[in-house]
């Protein structure tokens, strides 16, 4: 096990009606608030009114910026930065999913910087200051409510890139599972796949003696499998929605990566797909992850067999661990299919004519991935496995 520091200060406020506490939470950070949200679901289902009432009750002055699209765009981030500077905003409250939260994070550090906020996404600048933010989560998926990252798409050139710092971890995340009842099945499934992938990016490590965190990962993955199916069958099942919501945060708040080196290659490859084709990130991962697994499993057949056995209950074939490992990859594909996700580019209606371009863009800053380090040829080979 590697040495580590685990430092996660996001205050989690979880459960029914918790969104009514937002005003009191925000109050301690200042008076002027930017309320940031997406394409309208929060207005349609009444959450917006409850949030605004709570902010007003706490005597806060509110500036609004809605319209965040899934795979959030740089142009809206720049609009938000201008608003924050104009109104001297003290705190940002993001009401939505990963896209809204990521947009809010980028606005926060962009507003404290005189240059182009994209500098943080190219690695030219490091984040040293930000407007603090809080979250009301409406879709369990990206884990951005307690993560240190943000992922933004620059329209020009279709670059989807991330930036990160401990400074941009949200101060609090309000999580009421009831607000997720209105999620379309497809979004519930995309969310389940994303959080499952966040666990796998950590699970597939070359680190030995990490059995405790292996088992935490396995419990999280088993929960996601079981409860996502329940939530799709019964969208108003509080217990299932609550379990998924908490699992999604734990999947990506750093706990499951303690003491081990994480991989993250599948995410880098997926971001090239959603940058160009604007598909949901979780759907892109359902396409990429099984292909990545097939390409790399020989690096540690034992670990892949353990995954198959402990997560999907595949019987361990001690005389042929490779068989068990491969069965695990089939089972994960089956799970994604069962919850209605595409597992190939073809399933998603995407042509295979831009694979070379994606492989090139993904490796612009050199090879990546820690379980197996991948160069441009490797990425292209993995993308070829995603075609059908
Ligand atoms: O925009 P509205 O109208 O609100 O609709 C949204 C959106 O269309 C809808 N939705 C959300 N909550 C709802 C709801 N519809 C009905 N009822 C509700 N309660 O769901 C759609 C998807 O929302 P989005 O925020 O895009 O989903 P998600 O949370 O999956 O976020 C995806 C983004 O997060 C990034 C992804 O790359 C992608 O851009 N990620 C961010 C990470 C991070 N910051 O740590 C890590 C992840 O790996 C990921 O890359
Ligand atoms: Zn993800």
Image (cartoon, rainbow, N blue to C red):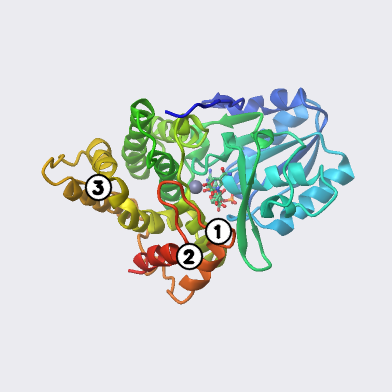
The quarter holding residue 118 reads bottom right
Residue furthest to the left in view is 319
Query: Which residue is label 3 attached to?
Result: 328
Instruction: Note whether residue 280 is visible.
Output: no
> Vertical placement of 240 versus 288: above or below?
above
Residue at 67% in and 65% down: 155
Task: Compare residues 99 and 35 and report the one nearer the observer.
Answer: 99
Q: Dividing the image into 4 quarters, which one contains the C terminus?
A: bottom left
x, y percentage for residue 350?
A: 44, 71
Which mark sits nearer the N-terminus, 2 or 3? Answer: 3
Residue at image location 68% in from the left, 55% down from the top: 122
Give 92 or 122, whichever is nearer the viewer. 122
Image position, residue 252 (x, y; %): 50, 37
In percent of width and height, residue 96 lies at: 60, 43
Are the residues tagged 2 and 3 within 8 Å (C-beta)?
no
Q: CA distance from mark 1 to mark 3?
A: 30 Å
Relative horizontal placement of residue 275, taking residue 213 as reference (left or right): right
Residue 376 is labelled as 2
Q: Is residue 347 left or right of residue 259?
A: left
The mark tally for this picture is: 3
Whether 337 is drawn above or below 101: the answer is: below
Distance in Å between CA atoms under marks 1 and 2: 8 Å
Q: Is residue 316 in view?
A: yes
Closer to the camera, 240 or 366? 366
333 left or right, relative to 351: left
Tell me if mark 2 has few (under 14), some (14-19) or many (20+) residues whose alpha carbon lies within 10 angstroms of its own.
Answer: some
Instruction: Give the residue displayed 85% in from the left and 49% down from the top.
Output: 114
Crowding at mark 1 (Cα within 10 Å: few <14, some 14-19, many 20+): few
- Regarding mark 2 in the picture, which secondary structure is present there? helix
The circle on residue 222 is none
In front: mark 1 or mark 3? Answer: 1
Query: Looking at the rendering, which quadrant does residue 200 occupy?
Result: top left
């Amino acid at each position: 096990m590697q040495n580590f520091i685990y430092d996660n200060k996001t205050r989690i406020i979880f459960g029914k009606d918790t969104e009514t506490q937002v005003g009191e939470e925000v109050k301690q950070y200042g008076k002027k608030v930017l309320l940031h949200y997406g394409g309208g679901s929060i207005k349609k289902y009444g959450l917006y009114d409850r949030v605004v009432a709570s902010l007003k009750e706490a005597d806060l002055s509110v500036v609004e910026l809605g319209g965040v699209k899934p795979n959030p765009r740089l142009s809206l981030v720049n609009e938000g930065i201008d608003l924050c500077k104009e109104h001297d905003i003290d705190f940002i409250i993001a009401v939505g999913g990963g896209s809204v939260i990521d947009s809010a994070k980028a606005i926060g550090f962009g507003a404290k910087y005189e240059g182009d906020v994209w500098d943080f996404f190219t690695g030219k600048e490091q984040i040293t200051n930000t407007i603090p933010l809080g979250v009301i989560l409406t879709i369990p998926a990206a884990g951005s409510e307690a993560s240190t990252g943000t992922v933004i798409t620059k329209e020009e050139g279709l670059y989807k890139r991330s930036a990160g710092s401990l400074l941009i971890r949200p101060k609090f995340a309000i999580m009421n599972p009831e607000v997720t009842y209105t999620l379309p099945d497809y979004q519930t499934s995309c969310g389940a796949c994303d959080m499952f992938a966040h666990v796998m990016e950590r699970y597939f490590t070359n680190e030995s003696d990490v059995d405790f965190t292996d088992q935490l990962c396995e419990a999280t993955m088993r929960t996601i499998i079981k409860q996502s199916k329940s939530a799709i069958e019964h969208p108003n099942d509080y217990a299932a929605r609550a379990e998924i919501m908490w699992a999604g945060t734990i999947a990506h708040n750093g706990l499951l990566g303690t003491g081990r080196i994480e991989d993250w290659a599948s995410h880098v490859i997926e971001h090239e797909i959603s940058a160009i084709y604007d598909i949901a990130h979780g759907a892109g991962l359902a396409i990429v992850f099984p292909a990545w697994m097939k390409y790399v499993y020989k690096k540690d057949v034992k670990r892949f067999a353990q995954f198959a056995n402990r997560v999907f209950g595949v019987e361990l074939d001690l005389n042929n661990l490779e068989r068990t490992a491969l069965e695990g990859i089939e089972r994960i594909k089956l799970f994604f299919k069962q919850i209605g996700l595409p597992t190939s580019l073809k399933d998603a209606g995407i042509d295979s004519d831009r694979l070379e371009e994606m492989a090139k863009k993904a490796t612009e800053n050199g090879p990546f991935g820690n379980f197996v380090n991948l160069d441009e040829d490797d990425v292209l080979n993995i993308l070829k496995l995603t075609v059908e």
